[in-house]
Image (tube, grey):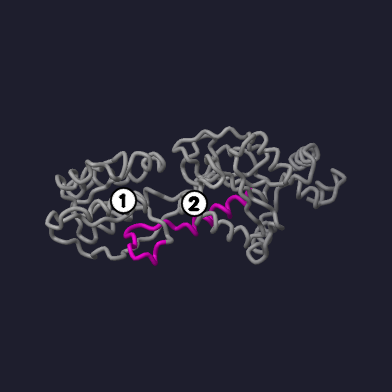
Amino acid sequence: MKDVARECGVHQTTVSLALRKHPSIPPHTRERIKAVADRMGYRPNPLVSALISERKKNKPVGDGSTLAFLTHYPTANGWQHAENYVLLRRMMEQRASRLGYKIEDFWIREKGMTPQRMGQILRSRGIRGIILCPFPKSEFHFDFDFSDFAAIAIGLTLVEPRLDRATIDYAALMQQCIDQLLLSGYSRIGFVSNTVMDNRVRHLSLGAFQAARYHQPGKFLNPVLFKQPHDSQFAKWVDSKRPDVLITSNTPEYHAFKKLLQAMEPENHPPEIVSVDSRPDLHAEPGMVHGMVQDMEALAEAAIDFLTSRVERGMTGIPPRPQAITIAGQWRQGNLPRTAKVR
């Protein structure tokens, strides 16, 4: 780096900042320094990088830098209706703070706002990292210029552009849930969900269930996707198929389907019910959800660690090979019988 600085007639710090695409260095200067570094065959010293990484563990490195939490709901607070997003946002804030960063909300559907204007605002603020909150639509194409930003999408709703993302591992949650139910002796396992949720998770829960059903057809019922949890066909389906346990997609569905099951006559032996993707903030609730619990803390830490590493290395723009960080969960037994009842 010293040789590159001497060749360019600048300080070593300027070279370091330029190679990390820091906005304090003018674009033409960054390009000139990078060209000289490439010509001279400069490569970062891995031992120095390791030392710096070790120091970062105990010392905030963000220097108060701001990360943008970008939302695209019809209202500024619309995303807060999803309690898991609120929890995730809070946990990301905590992780970012430990690294010397802060997170600020930006609503791109504000009156008069355009993607171009939002980009200008972020650049003028010196913000180089963007967290994309899951979009309200299941499949969203986002027209935004990411060339000056490092970005990570949360969840699976962003289709284009293909950015790095951090998400719950919905297939793994389903597989672990199934394993636990089989160990408990359940032999007529059903999966009920709705079409909206199935689309939002890219059919991963459904696919994992179907794979298990393919390999052990005698233990699994054909999965059913209702338009709404209160679908009138649900009770008829339960009466006719006689499942001994039902898997639901998430916490709201769990409570909706459980309410329908509680309305059934006891002599009909309504099945047990579990969630394959419940929120982690319900441990103290009397109506505790049984099943798989999202590890939101791990998701928050992974997303922030990944994004800040990109920011600090000046890795901006749409990645040529996007990476996906997937986070598994934990099983919550709750009041679910450890051994399946004979029905």
Q: Are marks 2 and 1 in contact (CB under 8 Å)?
A: no
In the image, residue 50 lies at what x, y percent?
Answer: 65, 59
The residues colored magenta run 282-310
Residue appearing at x 59%, y 48% in the figure: 69
Q: Is residue 281 magenta?
A: no
Q: Is residue 115 left or right of residue 205?
A: right
Q: Residues within 10 Å of mark 1 (few under 14, many from 20)?
A: some
For residue 256, the mark is 1
Q: Residue furthest right?
A: 9
The residue tagged with tag 2: helix, strand or loop?
Answer: helix
Q: Is residue 70 above or below residue 291?
A: above
Q: Secondary structure at mark 1?
A: helix
Which residue corresponds to the image point at 37% horizontal and 64% vertical from the top-left?
285
Which residue is more in the foreground, 219 or 10? 219
Side (left or right) of 26 relative to 135: right
Location of residue 316 (image quadrant): top right
Q: Residues within 10 Å of mark 2 (few under 14, many from 20)?
A: some
Q: Which mark is residue 226?
A: none
Q: Amino acid at mark 1?
A: Ala
Q: Which residue is mark 2?
A: 85
Q: Is residue 179 left or right of residue 25?
A: left
